[in-house]
Amino acid sequence: MKIMKTLALLSFVIISSGIVYAQDGESVFKSNCAACHTVGRGKLVGPDLAGIDSRRSEMWLVKWIKSSQQLVKSGDKDAADVFEQNNKIVMPDMSLSEGEIKSLLAYVKQAGSASAAVPAPAPKEAVNTTIAASAGQDSSSSFSSPGGMEYFLIALVCILFFVILGLSRVVKTLSAELAKVSQGK
Ligand code: HEC
């Protein structure tokens, strides 16, 4: 009984700590970027960030997010192009730590692949077409709410916890009955 409880609790803790990383990124994104960017829902003030991890290197992204104008002025061609293509709207510098940026990018990557419904390692040519497709359509896929899957998992673990609790109680009473019976009534 004790072991069951501990096991259930332990699996709950392990699963929930595993998704904290992506959830952190989600809250960083929502409070700093969501006003100007979507992931897979088209352009707002800035470009749609779905699939950004396949268009730019992580180092480029970290530099850009810390200070896009510094990158533009450094003569980086990609940076200058994006700046031009967006009517020279300046994206404000973000005072985020590298860790925050990385967890944010992990969230964008996860949300991007969920909204495009692409199995993880998509081949290079396919990536371009899915980016075009997801920019064109108003992706109304079932996983478009990014937190949905996590909440579902947490609920599942909670339900399993109670099922295990209930089952172990049944087993206990059953074995007590059995003991009574085998003792000869
Ligand atoms: C005030 C609006 C605004 C906010 C807030 C903002 N951005 Fe931007 N972002 C832009 C604009 C506009 C561009 C297009 C480039 C330009 O004009 O400088 C852009 C471009 C980008 C690009 C380059 C896209 C590409 O195709 O290469 C990335 C990556 C990016 N933003 C990430 C972020 C992240 C991550 C955050 C939050 C930490 C964020 N942005 C917050 C407006 C914003």
Image (cartoon, helix red, strand yellow):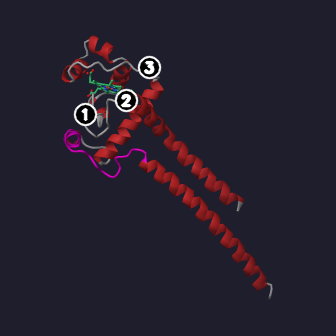
**Residue 11 relative to residue 19: left or right:** right
Instruction: Residue 173: say if magenta.
Output: no
Numbered circle sitting on residue 43? 1
Judge whether 175 appears above or below 54 on screen.
below
Task: Evaluate if marks 2 and 1 touch, with contact meaning CB atoms under 8 Å apart.
Answer: no
Question: Which of the two labelled residues, at mark 3 and mark 2, occupies the earlier sequence position?
Answer: 2
Q: Secondary structure at mark 1?
A: loop
Q: Label 2 belongs to which residue?
A: 33
Q: Nearer the viewer, mark 3 or mark 1?
A: 1
The magenta segment: 127-147
Q: Secondary structure at mark 2?
A: loop
Judge whether 165 appears above or below 118 on screen.
below
Residue at 29% x, 37% y: name it: 50
Badge 3, how many Cα within 10 Å: few under 14, some, many 20+?
few
Q: Quadrant of ligand 1?
A: top left
Distance from disc 2 to disc 1, alpha carbons, whole Å, reads 12 Å
Numbered circle sitting on residue 95? 3
Residue at 48% x, 35% y: name it: 24
- Residue 26 appears in the figure: yes
Distance from disc 3 to disc 1, alpha carbons, whole Å, reads 23 Å
**Residue 49 relative to residue 171: left or right:** left
Q: Please name the amino acid that badge 2 sits on.
A: Cys
> Any atom of ligand 1 within 8 Å of the CB at mark 2?
yes
